[in-house]
Amino acid sequence: MNRRQLLAKAVALMAVTVPLITGRAKAGAAPLPADARAGAAAATTPKVVLIGLDGLMYHKVQQVRARNLLRLAAEGLLTRGSIAPHTTISGPSWATVLTGVWDGKHGIRDNEFDAAPFARYPSVFTRLKRHDPTLKLHSITTWDRLALISASGEQRADVVMVTPESPHDPKEIATDCATADSVVTAVTRFAPDFLFTHLDQVDRAGHRSGGASEDYLEAVHRIDGLVGRIVAAVDARAAAHPSERWTVLVTADHGHTPRGGHGGQTEDETTNFVIARGPDFAPGATGVRTLVDLTPTILDLHGAPPAGYADGVSLREGPAAHPLSGGLAAAPR
């Protein structure tokens, strides 16, 4: 199934777009500056960046010693668990990330969906706008289907960008770099109150070569460099603007089988992780929570009321597993 069907019409009708900014990615991230951490307690304006890494398995992050992701996890909360019996396909999982409800509620089971589910279960963009219409909300992604979620509802993201795919970029290396460039620019120049981004090349490598392949590991290493660039921009912005209280969240939508592919219920496909680094999360904390907890966390960080129908719980309430999880917790590898 081709996941990259164009959504130009949907984005044009429902969202504000800005020009794509491209450039060369530079790997690596500096640690959170001491002055930024010292001023975090006094910061009054919450800012949240959610980084979605399609198809990434955390034990592969450990295997390649991906320094930026490992540093983020060490500087904040790392939770790992299973999303079983939730559908391990991108459409259902990103819908869960951005609504806080499992596929059994929003009803999305594959990558072909429309905006109807987000009328009943509004996206985090809509809920944030209902809470405070002045909030600046950005969505900058490599996968075009995500634009439909961020541009849905009567209130939606202010900026929706999808990086065009190049036929000369089969591994999505340049495409993801362009997405990361746009995120860095957005953080540095505009400092949105909430920014969601999505990078896709790890999933592409998993489909092409399998989760046990060198190709997959190389993609994990490359994506770690892009995460480093984004986090460096966040940290520089936080240091220059001490009134801003920045949090970085990272998750994935599903894993991959050793030979490639997903959609089943094996441990490799259902494995999930969440990293939360910011002034509300103790360095080195661990727990068992999953992607369904991200929308409740983002709402909580912005002081927005929780959705009564949500399956997830804010990570600020503690890292322990909760009874509304998708399935039984999986032991970390």
Image: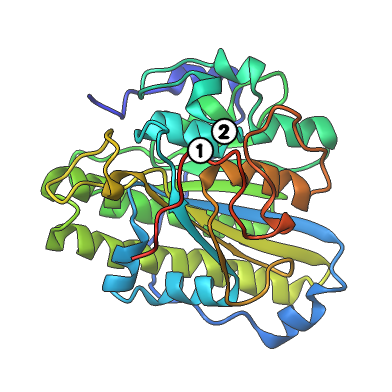
Residue 174, which numbered label?
none
Q: Amino acid at mark 2?
A: Thr
Q: Is residue 212 above or below residue 170?
A: below
Q: Position of residue 223 (x, y in %)?
A: 35, 61
In this view, the residue farthest toward the top is 116
Q: Is residue 67 above or below residue 78?
A: below
> How many neighbours does mark 1 have within 10 angstroms: few (below 14), some (14-19), or many (20 or more)?
many
Instruction: Please tell me whether mark 1 sits on a helix, a strand or a loop.
Output: strand
Residue 194 falls left or right of residue 251: right
Q: Position of residue 140 (x, y in %)?
A: 51, 43
- Foreground residue, 260 or 68? 260
Residue 36 falls left or right of residue 131: left
Mark 1–mark 2 Cα distance, whole angstroms, equals 6 Å
Query: CB atoms at circles 1 and 2 under 8 Å apart?
Result: yes
Residue ID at (38%, 35%): 90
Can residue 158 be seen?
Answer: no
Quarter assignment of residue 126? top right
Q: Amino acid at mark 1?
A: Met
- Foreground residue, 129 or 249? 249
Residue 134 falls left or right of residue 32: right
Residue matched to label 1: 161
Residue 261 falls left or right of residue 279: left
Q: Position of residue 299 (x, y in %)?
A: 74, 44
Residue ID at (50%, 22%): 104
In the picture, the quarter occupied by the C terminus is bottom left
Q: Position of residue 75 (x, y in %)?
A: 58, 76
Residue matched to label 2: 17
